[in-house]
Image: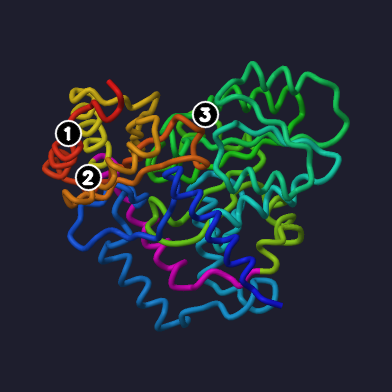
Amino acid sequence: MSCAWWQSMFKQILSDIKQRNLYRQLRGAPVGAINFSSNDYLGLGNDAEVIRAAQAAAAKWGTGAGASRLVSGTMAVHEELERRLAEWIGTEAALVFPSGFQANLGVMQALVSAGDEVYLDRFVHASLVDGARLSGARLKVYPHRDTERLKKLLAKPFSGKRLIVTDSYFSMDGDRAPLRDLVELSEKYGAMLLVDEAHAVGVYGKNGRGLLSEAGLSGRVTAVVGTLSKSLGSQGGFVCGSAELRDFLINKARTFIYSTGVSPLVCAAALASLDIVEKSDELRLRLWERVDTARAKLLAAGFNLGDSEGPIIPIMIGDSGRAVELADQLREAGILGVAIRPPTVPKGTDRIRLTITAKHTEQDIDLLVAALGSSAWAGQ
């Protein structure tokens, strides 16, 4: 049988994507470019101490775990990292997954199934949406940060398990979830609550413990999900919670059970980053200085930053073609600022998503603002 039909199908679909200015390509940061699209908020991915720790771990443990954690892939460095993560986040236990995406899929599929309900903020990360769909539970989506709508959904009688799911700091809009309201609703209606702190840990809270810690809500949620790949400059994801939750996930989370353990050098890098984050606030304070500077200059230039706060800064454009043009303009100026388009964000909310890190200088920010040019890009 000829394979020509599916090649034609691929070409047709790709042609349609290009016509709608939604075509995507794999791109890294050009050599020498100023990267305003990295989630390495504290710049620890290139820290000399972190690199040395990874090298030492590779020499001691090798480069891979060799098997799933339940077979023979658990090493002392995995257990040390999990102990430290639990201590940092303020929970009894933690479990490390190969990625944050797998952590979300694994914990959600373990917690709920057919006959249960999941309540999702409309703007949660794709991994949480996929986790809800794959769980088989009935999916209920409430408008972004709309706890009154969520309350109405929860007030309806239901006999199965309920799970409320939210990001604490939203990755595309750079705004916070109403965490206290969500905790109180979960307790009032007997629902479990999963909070993804991927973009908050390392950035918010004392010693970077996240927004739950900052709000004094640690210990009042079912599961806290985070990643090692953002503020900790490494790779992987983790789930924090009670000791019983950890044991439950070891036995029920398929993305953990059937995946090779995280590389020991990755664990060592994350441990070294944790040492830096817990010992000093210097990088976090520097990050917030740069965030305040960037926001002030972008607002003064007339750009629409939505309701964002913190290091994630969306420049709202509203049109895919214009967003791509502006991203290309930045690239030509030696700056990486990526266009975010549907389906990652709702239609008509296309944007340039900028992220500020502790490694940016004030000169970098000045070059960014100059390269962006007129706020007419945002239709103002």
Residue located beneath label 3 in the image? 177
Kind of element beneath mark 2:
helix
Residue located beneath label 1 in the image? 373
| Residue type at numbered disc 2 | Gln
Q: Is residue 6 above or below residue 281?
A: below
Q: In terms of sequence position, does the residue under pointer 1 or pointer 2 come before the other? A: 2
Residue 340 within the segment the image draws in magenta: no
Q: In terms of sequence position, does the residue under pointer 3 or pointer 1 come before the other? A: 3
Kind of element beneath mark 1:
loop
Nearer to us in this view, 258 or 214:
258
Query: Which residue is painted at 50% across and 42% down in the image?
Result: 344
Nearer to us in this view, 133 or 92:
133
The reply to whether the C-beta atoms of the residues labelled 3 and 2 are less than 8 Å apart is no
Kind of element beneath mark 3:
loop
| Residue type at numbered disc 1 | Gly
The residues bearing labels 3 and 1 have C-alpha atoms spaced at a distance of 32 Å
Location of residue 123 by image quarter: top right
Q: Is residue 368 above or below residue 374?
A: below
Residue located beneath label 2 in the image? 329
The residues bearing labels 1 and 2 have C-alpha atoms spaced at a distance of 9 Å
Nearer to us in this view, 14 or 356:
14
Q: Is residue 37 above or below residue 236?
A: above
Figure quadrant of the N terminus? bottom right
The residues bearing labels 3 and 2 have C-alpha atoms spaced at a distance of 33 Å
Location of residue 76 by image quarter: bottom right
Query: Which residue is painted at 26% across and 39% down in the image?
Result: 285
The reply to whether the C-beta atoms of the residues labelled 1 and 2 are less than 8 Å apart is yes
The reply to whether the C-beta atoms of the residues labelled 3 and 1 are less than 8 Å apart is no
Which stretch appears magenta?
A: 259-285
Q: Nearer the viewer, mark 3 or mark 2?
A: 2
Left/right placement of residue 116 relative to residue 68 reads: right
Residue 183 position within the rendered picture, expressed as x and y whole percent measured from the top left: 63, 27
